[in-house]
Structure formats: structure tokens, C-alpha cells
């Protein structure tokens, strides 16, 4: 399987969402910039790992700014769209190692 890269630098929106009823939900990440939207399906544990890491990063931003940094509001995804990509392994785990210039690094 070839690797696909969806570049949004920066995205207008980047949110996690679900489609379906509890127990049969599909979890996805959605990035949007203008009319362009990409949805990527992933496992519930991957969304949880990303959410935990984002919470840590936002806490660090607030700490380093002395509480003056604005924390993004909760934003619902756009209308659910079919995932364009699914992870090859249903047992893979997620992490957030990517850093761009100026990104806050956690000391933990």
C-alpha cells in the first residue's frame, strides 16, 4: 500500500468525530481548509491517544504563556464524509511525534 499525505498547512479546522450508534461507531479525524475536506478513519484508542496528547500540549502552551494563551474552542466536524483512508492494521496505536517550528515541546 502506498503512503498518502494530506497536507493542510495550517488547516482551518482539525477535529475528531464519530458516525454511527454506540458500539458500532466509526471514529475519524477531519481536516479542512476552505472547501477542501479530508476525513481519515481510525480506531477509538487512536483518537483517545491523540486527544490525550493534545490536552497535554495545550496545558503546556497555557503554562508557558502564564495563562494568556487562547485555547481553541470545541468545534463539531462538518457533515460526516466517508473516510478516504483506513489504517492498514486494526491494532496499530497512535502517537503525536510531529513538531513544526515553534511547536511547544513537553518536558514530560
Image (cartoon, rainbow, N blue to C red):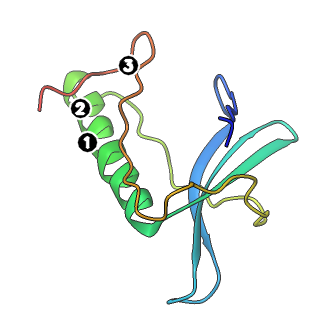
Of 93 and 99, the residue lying toward us = 93
Q: Position of residue 104 (x, y in %)?
A: 31, 21
Whichever of callouts 2 and 3 sits on the residue coming sooner in the sequence is 2
> Residue 69: where, in percent of width, then height?
36, 29
Q: Who's the residue at 73% across and 59% down the image?
A: 83
**Could you tell whether 42 is left or right of 56 in the image?**
right
Tell me residue 44's x, y (percent). 44, 68
Q: Are marks 2 and 1 in contact (CB under 8 Å)?
A: yes
Identified at 27% across, 32% down, the residue is 62
The residue positioned 41% from the left and 39% from the top of the image is 71
| Residue that numbered label 1 is attached to | 56
Q: Which residue is mark 3?
A: 103
Mark toward the viewer: 2 or 3: 3
The residue sitting at the top extreme is 101
Q: Quadrant of the C terminus?
A: top left
Badge 1 crowding class, 10 Å Cα cut-off, few under 14, some 14 to 19, many 20 or more, is some
Dot 2, how many residues are within 10 Å of its Cα: few (below 14), some (14-19), or many (20+)? some
Please name whichever residue, 4 or 13, is drawn nearer the observer in this view of the structure: 4
Image quadrant in which you'd find residue 31: top right
Q: Residue at x 29, y 29 (%)?
A: 61
Residue where numbered disc 2 is placed: 60
Residues marked 3 and 1 touching at CB (< 8 Å): no
Amino acid at each position: 500500500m502506498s503512503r498518502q499525505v494530506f497536507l493542510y498547512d495550517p488547516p482551518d479546522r482539525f477535529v475528531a468525530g464519530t458516525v454511527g450508534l454506540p458500539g458500532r461507531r466509526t471514529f475519524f479525524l477531519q481536516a479542512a481548509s476552505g472547501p477542501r475536506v479530508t476525513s481519515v478513519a481510525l480506531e477509538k484508542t487512536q483518537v483517545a491517544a491523540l486527544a490525550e496528547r493534545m490536552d497535554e500540549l495545550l496545558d503546556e502552551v497555557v503554562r508557558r504563556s502564564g495563562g494568556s494563551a487562547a485555547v481553541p474552542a470545541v468545534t463539531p466536524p462538518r457533515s460526516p464524509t466517508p473516510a478516504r483512508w483506513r489504517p492498514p492494521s486494526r491494532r496499530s496505536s497512535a502517537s503525536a511525534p510531529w513538531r513544526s517550528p515553534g511547536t511547544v515541546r513537553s518536558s514530560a
